[in-house]
Amino acid sequence: MKDKLEALKAEALTKLQAVNDPQILNELRVKYLGKKGELTEVLRGMGGLSAEERPVIGQVANLVRSAIEEVIGAKQELFQQQETESRLNAEKIDVTLPGRGMPQGGIHPLSRVIQEIEDIFIGMGYKVAEGPEVETDYYNFEALNLPKNHPARDMQDSFYITDDILMRTQTSPVQIRTMQAMNGEPVKVICPGKVFRRDDDDATHSFQFHQIEGLVIGRNIRMSDLKGTLQQFMKEMFGPSAGIRLRPSFFPFTEPSVEVDVSCFKCGGEGCRLCKQSGWLEILGAGMVHPNVLRMGGYDPEVYSGFAFGMGAERIAMLKYGIDDIRYFYTNDMGFVKQFKGI
Ligand code: DAH
C-alpha cells in the first residue's frame, strides 16, 4: 500500500510540474485529491490493514496529500502571478509618448476688427442692434430718403429677390428699424452686419462686405457731438495721435453730410504709400440725420436731432493690418488667416 502511495505521489508530482494551464491543474487536483480521486481510492483499502500498519500508512498518505497540495498551491500562485502580469502588460500606458497636437484657431481679422469697434462704442454707452440681410426696398432706400428713381440709388445696385425685396446694400436700414422700435425714446446704437452690392469683385470691391452703422438721436444732438465722438473713436482705434478731418459730401439720409478722414497712422501725416502721399485715410461717411429720415422713424425733427455714420469693416481691417486685397478675407487661405492668430 505504501508503494502504491509513493507511486501515486511520483506520478502526480511529475504531471503537476509539467502543467502550464490553470484548467488542467484543476482537473488534476480533482483526479488526485477529489472525493472520488485516486488518493481517496487508495485510502479506501486502509480498512484491510492491521492496527500497527494503519497509522504508518495514514502518515504516509498525509505526507503524499500535503506534497501534492503544496505543488498545486505553488502552481496556482504562479498562474495567478502570470495572469496579473499579462494584464498589467496589456493595460500599460506609455506616459513618455508625446501628446497629439491640438491645432489652436484664432479670431478672423475681420471679426476681430468688428469686435474692436463694437467694444469702443459700447464703452461710450452704445447698444448693438442688428437687422435683416434680406430687406425691403422701403427700409433699404425709401425710408432713408431715397425714393424710387432717385439717382443716388445708382451707386448701390443690389441683388433683387422681387421688385420690392433685396439683399440690403447698407446697414443704414437698421437706423429706421431701430427708431421705430425705440418709439420716440433717445437712440444710441451701432449696427454691424453684412451688406451686398452688385459689384464686380476686385482688390477693393466685393459683392458682399461688412459695415458698421452708428445712430444717435436725442434732443440737442449737434454736429460737434458727431465730431467729438468720431475723434474719440479714431484715437482708440488707431492710437492717441490720430486726428480727423471732415470734408463736405452727400448722402440722401444726412444733411449736412461729411466724409471723414483719419490722419495716416503709418506715416503720421507725412505722406506715404498707404495714404497715397496725402497724409489722410478715408474712413467713413457721416452726417446729421435728415429731417425726412427722423420723421419716417417716428421722431419730430422740430424736437429731435441726431447724427449717423457708416464705415466699412474690411476697409478698416485692410488699413490697420496692411492687407492689399479684400478677397483674402473670404478665401479661407490658412497662410493668410494664421498671420492674425497672435495679434
Ligand atoms: N450707408 C452709406 C454707404 O453705404 C454709409 C453711410 C454714410 C452711413 C453716412 C451713414 C451715414 O449712416 O450717415 O455708403
Image (spheres, rainbow, N blue to C red):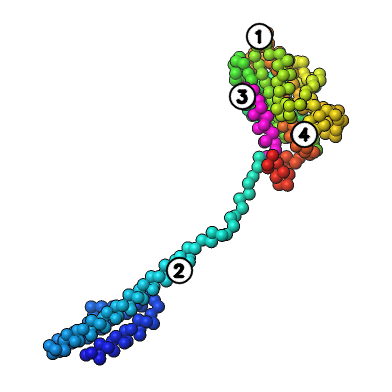
Q: Earlier in the sequence, mark 1 or mark 3?
A: 3
The magenta segment is: 108-126
Label 1, label 4: how many angstroms apart (C-alpha)?
A: 39 Å
Q: Is residue 117 magenta?
A: yes
Q: Is residue 268 left or right of residue 74?
A: right
Badge 3, how many Cα within 10 Å: few under 14, some, many 20+? some
Give the residue displayed 61% in from the left and 24% down from the top. 127
Secondary structure of the residue carrying tag 4 is helix
Label 3, label 4: how many angstroms apart (C-alpha)?
A: 26 Å
Give the residue displayed 73% in from the left and 15% down from the top. 224
Rendered image quadrant of residue 29: bottom left
Q: Nearer the viewer, mark 1 or mark 3?
A: 3
Q: Earlier in the sequence, mark 3 or mark 4?
A: 3
Q: Amino acid at mark 2?
A: Ser
Between 73 and 225, the one lying in front of the other is 73
Between 238 and 145, the one lying in front of the other is 238
Measured from the top left, where is residue 298 in percent x and y?
63, 14
Q: Earlier in the sequence, mark 2 or mark 3?
A: 2
Q: Quadrant of the C terminus?
A: top right
Q: Nearer the viewer, mark 2 or mark 1?
A: 2
Q: Amino acid at mark 3?
A: Lys
Name of the residue lying farthest toward the right: 277
Q: Is residue 309 left or right of residue 268?
A: left
Which label is found at residue 303?
A: 1
Badge 4, how many Cα within 10 Å: few under 14, some, many 20+? some
Measured from the top left, where is residue 220 in percent x and y?
67, 11
- Quick check: can you spot residue 95? yes
Give the residue displayed 71% in from the left and 29% down from the top. 237
